[in-house]
Amino acid sequence: APEQRRQWWWAESAGMPLSKDDVSAIETVAHYTHDEDQAYLMLYGEGVFETIPIEADYTVGDMKLWLNFHKGKDPAEYDLVGPKGCWKMGAGSEVLGDEVLIADVMGERFEKKWLMQLSLFPKKKSESTGQWESTFETIDEWVPPPPEEAWDEEDDDEVKWKAELAKNENDG
């Protein structure tokens, strides 16, 4: 199909280290456990909730290629959002460019093989131009709320939590 060829051309023309065959072989893991030898990345948002193994040379563009191949996600319709600069506690978030190495923005998380996450954030189509535009606003720094605002009685509702968990598992 022409549309599919165009999407693969997009990925290959961006100079990404992974090919269509490479991403087709990357399989999700059902239940993440820490692995001292293998780094894992969670891709989350827009109906996607998957964890995959990654290597030091994987780029944000490679993740978009994986999302296109395995989930049918058009890279024009979402941004991948991750740490602003390099991950640290309290780091902000920003849209990451296709050429960004995931290992570079994850820093210590990648080095220590801690679970990492990139979030899919939807774009919206401009009525005037017809182009997809980012809806994500960069967050310079994340400051946690004070403890009295971070928890309420509903957070301790185990029945509600189990119902939400069951619903999420049923949704895939």
Image: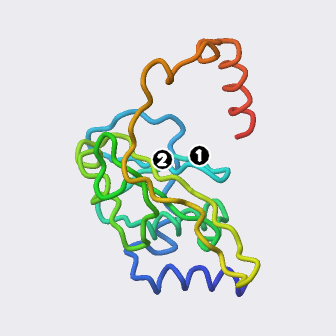
Quadrant housing residue 58 = bottom left
Residue in view at x 62 percent, y 85 percent: 6
The residue closer to the viewer here, 27 or 157, is 157
Where in the figure is residue 164, as x and y percent of width and height?
A: 70, 26
Residue 91 vertical placement versus 125 (above, below): above
Residue in view at x 43 percent, y 49 percent: 41
36 lies left or right of 171: left
Residue in view at x 71 percent, y 76 percent: 126
The residue closer to the viewer here, 167 or 160, is 160
- Helix, strand or loop under label 2: strand
43 lies left or right of 146: right
Cα separation, mark 2 vs mark 1, equals: 7 Å
Q: Where does label 1 land, which residue? A: 49
Residue 46 vertical placement versus 68 (above, below): above
Q: Residues within 10 Å of mark 1 (few under 14, many from 20)?
A: few
Q: Where does label 2 land, which residue? A: 42
Where in the figure is residue 49, as x and y percent of width and height?
A: 59, 46
- Helix, strand or loop under label 1: strand
Quick check: marks 2 and 1 in contact, CB under 8 Å? yes
Quadrant housing residue 14 = bottom left
* Visual colour scheme: rainbow
Residue in view at x 65 percent, y 75 percent: 132
Q: Amino acid at mark 2?
A: Met
Where in the figure is residue 129, as x and y percent of width and height?
A: 70, 85
Q: Residues within 10 Å of mark 2 (few under 14, many from 20)?
A: many
In the rendered structure, which disc, 2 or 1, sits on the residue that comes first in sequence? 2
The disc at residue 129 is none
Residue 115 vertical placement versus 57 (above, below): above
Residue 107 vertical placement versus 80 (above, below): above
Where in the figure is residue 171, as x and y percent of width and height?
A: 74, 38
